[in-house]
Amino acid sequence: MPSLNTLLITVSPDVALHAESCGVDSIFVDMESRGKAERQGHLDTHRAEHTLDDVARLAPLLTRSELLVRLNPIWEGTAGEVEGAVVAGADRLMLPMFRTPDDVEVFKNIVAGRVPVTLLVETAAALSRLPSILPLLSSGDRVHFGLNDLALDMKLSFLFEVLGGRLLDGPSALCREAGVPFGIGGVGRIGHGNLPAEWIVGEHVRLGSEWVILSRAFHNGIKTLQDLERDIDLRAEIEALRRCCEEFSKATAAELSANHLRLARKAAELGGMSQ
């Protein structure tokens, strides 16, 4: 039965430990800063404030959840960033905003197998070149499709138009055929959102995705454990997400296609409204 593993962006030790105890699979430290504000300044997305000190602070605390660190796109400082993150205790490194197989090969050579990597596919170029990129990955490596930047790169008005247009159907099939686990974007709480979170979960099941980020809409952009516990029951919300995934895993192909169609229509509607 398919499962949907979760990632939560935080550098708060209290929040990270609480999230781990509630079943979050990966704690996500976001050190990407180069070019991100220019790309996403108009969007309600996470703004990187995280450092190697945050990685070093969290690494000895986590016993079950992996510690993932997103670095900057390839630049002259990549080798130093990789070395610093590995020494600080990262379990996995993420490469964002790459465009070519050469970018991936450079990154993989720098990492040199010390930890697994996740490739954040968030450009049309990377999406198109996936057949040449996937063979560069090793056992334990993953792919994550980043909907915000993919939508921006494709001049779409709403991130879930990427799913609505079936633009990840082919790339998802390539990952499945190559045996590379993958995830897609983020998700809010079940029962919430202008585009219902459960419809998005249905797309994860249809495409075979195994990973999703708990978005700002999921946890209201919290930064402290006090705020989190005041606003939501994290364990209950994660269980609801997994129950939804379990229900969709029992759906027929026709039912999954019908779910996609309603998502596509709503995404197009919301995209038109934001133009």
Image (cartoon, grey):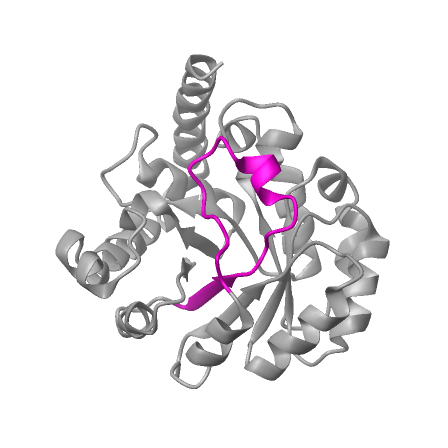
Picture quadrant where residue 16 is located: bottom left
Picture quadrant where residue 39 is located: top right
Q: Quadrant of the N terminus?
A: bottom left
Percent position (x, y) of residue 265?
A: 43, 19
18 vs 77, nearest the viewer: 77
Q: Taking 163 as reference, is 74 above or below it?
A: below
Residue at the image point whose x is 28% and y is 72% from the top: 14
Picture quadrant where residue 232 is located: bottom left
Q: Main secondary structure of the magenta part?
A: loop
Q: Is residue 32 magenta?
A: yes
Instruction: Count the marks.
Output: 0
Percent position (x, y) of residue 58?
A: 42, 77
Percent position (x, y) of residue 101?
A: 83, 53
Q: Taking 59 as reference, is 240 above or below it?
A: above
Q: Is residue 168 visible?
A: no
Residue stretch in magenta: 25-50
Is residue 152 rendered to the left or right of residue 257? right
As drawn, which residue projects farthest toward the left? 230
Residue at the image point whose x is 44% and y is 17% from the top: 274
251 vs 266, nearest the viewer: 266
Q: Is residue 110 magenta?
A: no
Residue at the image point whose x is 59% and y is 55% from the top: 32
Percent position (x, y) of residue 165?
A: 56, 26
Q: Is residue 193 visible?
A: yes
Is residue 118 rendered to the left or right of residue 238? right
